[in-house]
Amino acid sequence: MTIQALVQSQRDYFLSGETLDYRFRINQLRKLRSMLENYEKNIYRALKQDLNKSKYESFTTELGFLFNEIKHTEKHLKDWMEDESCDAPITHKGTKSFIRKEPYGVTLVISPWNYPLQLAIAPVIGAISAGNTVIIKPSEYSQSSSSLLAKMMRETFDPKYIAVVEGAKEVSEQLLQEKFDYIFFTGSTAVGKIIMREASKHLTPVTLELGGKSPAIIDRDANIELSAKRIVWGKFTNAGQTCVAPDFLYIHSKIKDKLLKEMKKQLKSLYKKNPLGNDDYVRIINENHFNRLLTYLENGTIVQGGNIDRNQLKIEPTIIDHITWNDPVMQEEIFGPILPVLSFEDLEEVIRTLKTMDKPLALYYFGEKEKNQEKVITKLSFGGGCINDTLYHLANPNLPFGGVGASGMGAYHGKYSFETFSHRKSILKQTTKFDLPLRYPGGKLAFSII
Ligand code: NAD
């Protein structure tokens, strides 16, 4: 089937109204969950092939995450779908105002390679729950996961409802020629701009889940052991190929040496003495990214790691000290297991500097004083983040997940996914039992209606 025919078949199906019913949506979510359960072993195999992800990491960061999202959505969908009644001014006596949530229609999800199943399927949970049809374009770089996704979806859903179109940039471009009712994109900021430009041709609304350089600030009074452990975990999970991984550390100069020493200790306990020989340590997705990352190893002074294995495309968890803002490693998102370190004397100086940069997807602050925690949250703009932790905010389905400015627009997870894929239609129901004269010329009260 051509892309044009596929989109048309989804449009016809959507217009038939079958996807609207609550029961229908719940049944599709159940089918999706069973699909993931039935294919669990194949999923582990595909993620191992694409990224050398361990079973443990595949479950905690992909499958388990999806199971939680589905469960949460099943539990709350009925409530989310309810009309929301709204107050009205006295001038609207006799009326009822409410918001009806309606699906957009035919939607497109374009996803990246780093969490190839989670990032393709999590938006689909939102699209299903809101009553849309979906076409998914997964990444060409995570080939095993993308073709498994296509196979699983083909066997579970009719393509007029949910379909996977595999391929590279050219296929994305072809898809973007079609008119969609909503586009949900996860990927780089550069491609995000292209998606928005293409979507504007059809005035299609978009969510853009992008990347950027997410800082972790570690203040003088931070708990050294826990900060080190949580930073190391957040940075080196998936070998740093995580959109919300701490991209660089900004450490108070008085605790820098102590923290770096503790991080080395934590690294050993998480990845053992020789991470390159550790069967569960994630590899870099492809040679291009591997070579790009190697150039950063020439910056500053390596204080931990730095070894590589070209055959396996693995780079040791690496910490680089004596970095300046002018180093290449500080010019773009790293997206790999390399962690540059900057130091500071005063939190105000950190805030002043970060304010001049693009708004990051995440920001992490480690420190005990509530006054300083508040200062960071209030004075800096970023997608979301944690105080005294990394990554954990995105695993709470009650928190919206998304960027701001260069790190994206819109948000999802839990209820926010449902809302993202729903149009809020405003309805005012007027009474015919009486007619207030106020609005008509000659009415006793002057008031504004627009
Ligand atoms: P990418 O932007 O290169 O690719 C993402 C998707 O867009 C892929 O499916 C790809 O085939 C498609 N694509 C590529 N070029 C295109 C073009 N010119 N026109 C249309 N489609 C095109 O991103 P990536 O390398 O797969 O992923 C890494 C990036 O994604 C990082 O910047 C990371 O921070 C970001 N990311 C963000 C989130 C988030 O939730 N905000 C999550 C994961 C990754």
Image: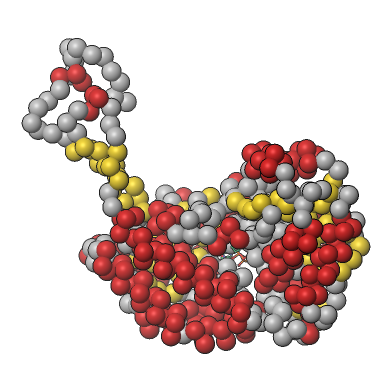
* Position of the N terminus by quadrant: bottom left
- Quadrant housing residue 52: bottom right
In the image, residue 430 sits, relative to residue 299, either above or below, namely: above
User: Image quadrant of ligand 1?
Assistant: bottom right
Residue 404 locus on image (x, y percent):
58, 47
Residue 210 locus on image (x, y percent):
59, 57
Is residue 386 at least partly visible in the picture?
A: yes
Residue at position x 77%, y 55% from top?
223
Residue at position x 45%, y 59% from top?
414
Residue at position x 73%, y 48% from top?
368
Is residue 334 at least partly visible in the picture?
A: no
Q: Nearer the viewer, residue 240 or 280?
A: 280
- In the displayed structure image, the side of residue 206 where residue 356 appears, left or right: right
In the image, residue 63 sits, relative to residue 357, either above or below, namely: below
- Quadrant housing residue 304: bottom right
Q: How many numbered circles does the render carry?
A: 0
Q: Nearer the viewer, residue 137 or 215?
A: 215
Residue 16 locus on image (x, y percent):
22, 65
- In the displayed structure image, the side of residue 341 where residue 281 appears, left or right: left
- In the displayed structure image, the side of residue 193 where residue 159 appears, left or right: left
Query: What colouring does the structure picture have?
Result: secondary structure
* Position of the C terminus by quadrant: top left
In the image, residue 385 sits, relative to residue 28, either above or below, namely: above
Residue 201 locus on image (x, y percent):
45, 51
Residue at position x 21%, y 37% from top?
96
